Image (cartoon, grey):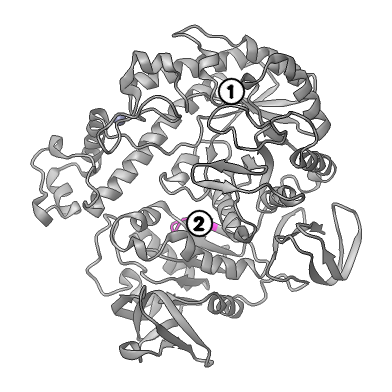
Amino acid sequence: MYLGADYYPEHWEKERWPIDAELMQKAGINVVRLAEFAWSKLEPEDNVHDFKWLDEVMDVLNKRGVKVILSTPTAAPPSWLINKHPHILPLLKNGQRMAFGARRHYCITNRTYYYYSERIIRKLAEHYKNDPQVIGWQIDNEFGGPKCYCDNCKKEFQHWLKLKYKTLENLNQSWGNAFWSHDYTSWEEIPLPIVDYHNPTFDLDFRRFFSDMTLKYSNMQIRILKSITPDKFITHNFMGLFPQLNYYKLAEKYDFVSWDNYPEKLENKFHIGLAHDIMRGLKKKNFWVMEERVSYIIREDIIIPTLPPGQMRLWTYQCYAHGAEAVVYFRWRACSFGIEQFDSGILGHDGTDKSISYREAAQMGSEIRRIGPQFEGSKVVSPAAIVYDYDNVWVNYAYQERPMYNYPDEMLRFYKAIRKRGINVDMVKSTDELSKYKAIIAPLMYIVTDEAADNIKRYVEKGGIFIAGFRFGIKDTHSNMVKSVLPGKLEKLFGLSIHTWDNLREKKVEVKDTEGNIYQADTFADLITPKEAKPIARYNSNWYTGHTAVAVNTFGKGRAYYVGCGLPQGFYDRFIEKILPGLALESIKVPDEVEIATRGKKGKRFVFVMNFSAKPSRIFLKKKYTELIKGERLEEKIDLGPFEVLILM
Ligand SMILES: [Zn+2]
């Protein structure tokens, strides 16, 4: 199993390289990612290539048994290239061209940039194609912007729209261009969305377009690498909950997904878990963490303190618990110059092995070497899933009701309630095969396509449990409001209708469930009129009184729930406990600060028990377990130290 570091040898004198390699070997670091932003060192002048330094450092690493993932360096075009072709720089929304001096400074549709990218990638691939030390490629770095508003992007966007809508009449109608006299009379008139206050359909299509252009650029790189080095894996470092790209589409052609995990606070464990689960869901397989935070970071708007001993190890195990096959720490050594000079590394600026992070990486190295093979390749099996798709993410980010709620927070309400019970959760598209899940949850699912509606109906008919959050099915695929009675296509499935709703940002509204529990509703309220459905909770304040807040309907062999408003976490905890009985890990009782996640292979189950607290905690085991890291037999009352991790079998 690999445990790695992101290494930038070009930042250090070459006399240092053997010392780094020796320290890596001592810590059990057996893979590094190289050359990520090294274009100016790999091609110091136009078409003059220098791979000698990279060959040399790789030889040094090879002697210590360290394998290599090579990056294509395209996230940082060098100064000579920009100077020669300044139009590679993106034109920003404010009309200014981005200046040279940071990174990701290229227009994603620029043909000249394609030419130079292809050439450096080809050269690199040819040079290393027969080198077994190079196990794979990372393409570019953290795709996602900046968005460019240049003339070429405008032409590409118009072309993209033409392919999609075929006729202007169709586009004008689909976009609702009768509104504010927005009808276009030629494709060339269609602008880029520069103004902030524009049509939501326009906004959604531009997001889809930008995502598709990124996909096209990524596919160009994949094509070259696959043709020259078919035996090496190809991945890209994704960014968890990053909302600007359709990650499902982007992930399709990679061998596996990897991602950059920079957790901020211990109490955000579910937030990080959710991001891991989204990453696993992109290809429905295990993933790598390509950048894992080691300790403090100070940048303009981020201040993260030094991690106390044990916390880096805890977060590393959380990666494995959610399906990571390898973890690569960012970065090997804190850099003394550049914008990231206040970021930590496994080694500090002084390069000694005395840092907390080095000690902890070495502990991880020795533990993973010993126990990693046991759970390597094991799968995360989940009985429940949350619907996560990018059209729905994007319509929630567009103007309109955005300030009232955000997509991750609405997912987290349900996610926390399930995870707290030790139940794994998958992230799925609404059109995926759903039959293997006991329950599917769809928070903030504005857009319900015909295909998704049929899929959900089939799933519930055959015995599935479907839970919708508020605002279900309010929009069509053009981001226009549907004209039917809500919840639109699935009115029969839910056995209810919704004619009135309200936002609760500044209102206090009480909800009372059929057992007499009283909750304060928040965020948004769909006022439900049940038909066949049975109320589970009703509104209990002013003019809302009498309307249903939460309802359930039996449909075929299954049930469909509608949760019409935001409620306190206690509601979701009780709700999930009631409707998903028997799924929780009843043999282990843990307090709130402890997270449980499981992986399994060949009939063996590995239960990761992680104390997300700087204080001791206590768990109770109702049966005997063997603990994998220490090899002890455990039962009954177990005291956990701060940040302690157990892997129970
Ligand atoms: Zn452009």
Furthest residue toward top: 48
**Left or right: 498, with 259 as reference point:** left
The residue lying at 51 percent from left, 19 percent from top is 39
Q: Describe the element under mark 1 as helix, strand or loop.
A: loop
Q: Look at the picture and state if 145 lies above or below 20.
A: below
Q: Position of residue 202 (x, y in %)?
A: 24, 48
User: Quick one: label 2, few (<14), some, or many (20+) residues within 10 Å?
Assistant: many
For the residue pair 243 and 561, the one nearer the viewer reads as: 243
Q: Where is residue 513 in the image (x, y as percent from the top left)?
A: 49, 88
For the residue pair 72 and 580, the one nearer the viewer reads as: 72
Q: Mark 1 points at which residue?
A: 35
The residue lying at 60 percent from left, 36 percent from top is 342
Whether tag 2 and tag 1 are in contact, CB under 8 A, the answer is no
Q: Name the residue under label 2.
A: 428
Q: Position of residue 584 (x, y in %)?
A: 68, 71
Q: What stretch is highlighted in magenta?
A: 427-431
The residue lying at 23 percent from left, 42 percent from top is 194
Q: Describe the element under mark 2 as helix, strand or loop.
A: strand
